[in-house]
Image (cartoon, rainbow, N blue to C red):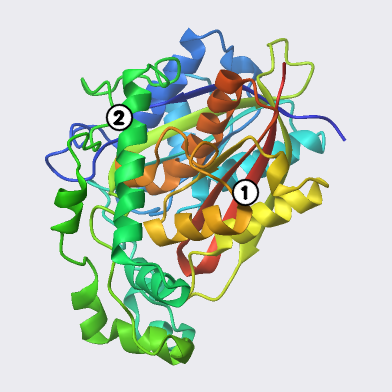
Amino acid sequence: MDDVYVLDYVRTPRGKGSSRGALHGISPVELTVGLQHALTDRGLNPALVEDVVIGTASQVDEQGANLARTATLLAGWGDGVPGGTVNRFCASGIDAVAQTAARIRAGDLRTAVAGGVESTSRVPMFSDRGPLFCDPDTIQRVGSVHMGIAADLNATLDGWTRAELDAYGLETQRKAAAAWEAGHFDASVIPAGGLKHDELIRPATTPESLAALEPAFAALGAEGQDDLALAAHPEAGRIEHLHTVGTSPALADGAALLLLGGADSGRRPRARIIASATAATDPVIMLTAGQIAVERVIAKAGLRPADIDVFEFAEAFAALCLRFRRDLDAGPDRLNPNGGTIAMGHAFGATGAVMVGGCVEELERRAGRYGVAAVSGAAGLGVAVLLERVP
């Protein structure tokens, strides 16, 4: 088995996932092509790339028809460079990285590019009209609920208060603003559409402004979603609707790519991908699978949570981050030290690749040894990747 390394990492800024967002005018294919050009500008010879694997959650319209192959052709990387797409909902980008790393480790590939892209402003959530989201019979049989209802169910079961959720929302905003001010993302962020910074950060956020926000998912709950959730988890009694737009991941447009390769790549490795893990849980609780995957990959490597210097955990609502912090004893200095998707935005397919790349950068910044990146996705899916910095 060969070792596999992260050799380079680039991403776009994250734009608001609306028609008013700065990246709305750029197609997801072009977001990807821009990053492919950035990798070649940083010294990558495309002729050495044996595959391009892109995670995308809504593979329809502008994100359909194998976006990875289309982007690779448009990037001018030559007819001989393959491309393929992966869909594991919000964990698509990290799964693309994990799958590609496994192929390199097995000796099937030597050098490859993996990552993700999502334009929620141009290809809206649920626009693929999948039965899990749009067919009443499937929804009823599976018991699937909206992600926001799952978040409020988790908050209710764990007993978190609105004040505790708001405090986490404020913390991630402050971390993200401080990280940008300190230049923590300067080496990896490639401007796109005139946008140079993550567009969604709200540095003026205060406890008072968060407290004034209305619950975001109460209306959905009243329309029957609460009944679905309680049918699966009657122990909750009733669902407390506590999450707001200030404690939920904001929809975003963006893309991220990582260059992966073996020890013989000819480039200085930045971090070794030790292992990955996938997990699944029931589709109503849903959002706990990312944490399960983290626990699984740490145990697989014979490590303990205390051995991990950096956790990059996609902020799929504040309640799940508070649970992660409690269960793994991951304080604010180790869990999302530069902020997360509540503050900077969630571009579904891209988020996992951003988590992996950000974990590498933070390990380098603090000279840490081990880091874990993880994402929880819809339908109770989760993926985690364990990294070791190369000194």
Secondary structure at badge 1 equals strand
- Whether residue 35 is visible: yes
Q: Is residue 157 left or right of residue 8?
A: left
Q: How many marks?
A: 2
Image quadrant in which the N terminus is located = top right
Say which quarter of the image contains residue 119.
top left
Residue at (33%, 23%) from the top-left corner?
Answer: 180
Percent x, y of residue 188: 45, 20
At 31% from the left and 49% from the top, the residue drawn is 169
Image side of residue 290 versus residue 296, left or right: left
Residue 27 locus on image (x, y percent): 28, 36
- Which percent across, then down, holds residue 101? 69, 37
Tag 2's secondary structure? Answer: helix
Q: Horizontally, is 85 left or right of 151 in the view?
A: right
- Tag of residue 226: none
User: From this viewpoint, is residue 88 visible?
Assistant: no
Please state which of the two labelled residues, at mark 2 or mark 1, is closer to the viewer.
2
Q: Sequence order check: which comes first, mark 2 or mark 1?
A: 2
- Left or right of 257 on screen, residue 255: left
> What residue does disc 2 label?
177
* Amino acid of disc 1: Ala
Residue closest to the eye, 99 or 162: 162
x 31%, y 77%: residue: 240
Label at residue 384: 1
The residue depicted at 35 percent of the width and 80 percent of the height is 135
Residue 128 place in picture, x, y as percent:
34, 62
Q: Nearer the viewer, residue 47 or 10?
A: 10
The three-letter code of the residue at mark 2 reads Ala
Query: From the viewer's perspective, is residue 128 above or below residue 312?
Result: below
Alpha-carbon span between mark 2 and mark 1: 26 Å
Q: Is residue 207 above or below residue 225?
A: above
Mark 2 closeness class: few <14, some 14–19, many ≥20 residues within 10 Å: some
